[in-house]
């Protein structure tokens, strides 16, 4: 998964890495993790369609991809794994946390008029903790 900058849509790491550094990075993942990360990148490429992919990815591209995964019914842990795959090759990890997609999903659902009870069920919350995830004051329930 690690290479040099290119004009293709394949995932690359932009930088001047030595062959040893590339080998160490590629060796850090198990074969099954590499395969899983490749599948994530393929899903992203399919989702973005004709858009050019360059690293670092645009925040809107990542957010829309996460939203797409959420609407397909993927579990939070699965979405977090997809975020890990994307961050492995060039996202700024200070911009994304494990709960970023939960915040976005809860806020989006509230903005669409979903009831607190439905949002709670969709997010698998057993308490009113979901209220901390809705980030737009004007739509808080």
Image: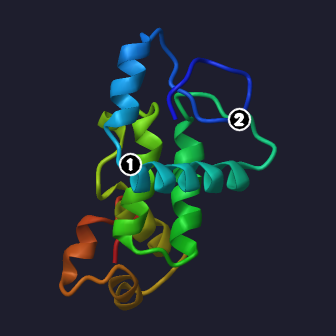
For marks 1 and 2 on the same chain, the one whose residue lies earlier in the sequence: 2
The residue lying at 51 percent from left, 58 percent from top is 66
Q: Is mark 1 on a helix, strand or loop?
A: helix
- How packed mark 1 is, by other alpha carbons closer than 10 Å (few <14, some 14-19, many 20 or more), is some
Q: Position of residue 19 (x, y in %)?
A: 44, 14
47, above or below 5, in the image: below
The residue lying at 32 percent from left, 84 percent from top is 120
Q: Nearer the viewer, residue 19 or 73?
A: 19
The residue lying at 81 percent from left, 44 percent from top is 50
Q: Give the labeled residue for mark 2.
A: 9
87, above or below 132, in the image: above
Q: Which quadrant does the C terminus fall into? A: bottom left
- How packed mark 2 is, by other alpha carbons closer than 10 Å (few <14, some 14-19, many 20 or more), is some
Q: Give the labeled residue for mark 1.
A: 84
9, above or below 20, in the image: below
In this rendering, would 40 be left or right of 117?
Answer: right
């Amino acid at each position: 998964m690690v290479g040099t900058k290119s004009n293709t849509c394949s995932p690359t790491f932009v930088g001047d890495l030595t062959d040893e550094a590339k080998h160490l990075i590629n060796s850090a993942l198990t074969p099954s993790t590499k395969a899983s990360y490749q599948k994530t990148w393929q899903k992203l490429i399919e989702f973005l369609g004709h858009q050019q992919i360059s690293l670092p990815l645009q925040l809107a591209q990542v957010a829309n991809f996460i939203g797409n995964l959420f609407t397909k019914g993927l579990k939070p842990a699965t979405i977090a794994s997809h975020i890990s795959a994307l961050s492995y090759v060039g996202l700024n990890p200070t911009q994304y946390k494990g709960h970023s997609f939960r915040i976005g999903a809860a806020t989006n659902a509230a903005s669409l008029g979903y009831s607190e009870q439905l949002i709670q069920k969709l997010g698998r919350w057993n308490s009113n903790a979901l209220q901390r995830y809705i980030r737009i004051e004007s739509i808080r329930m």
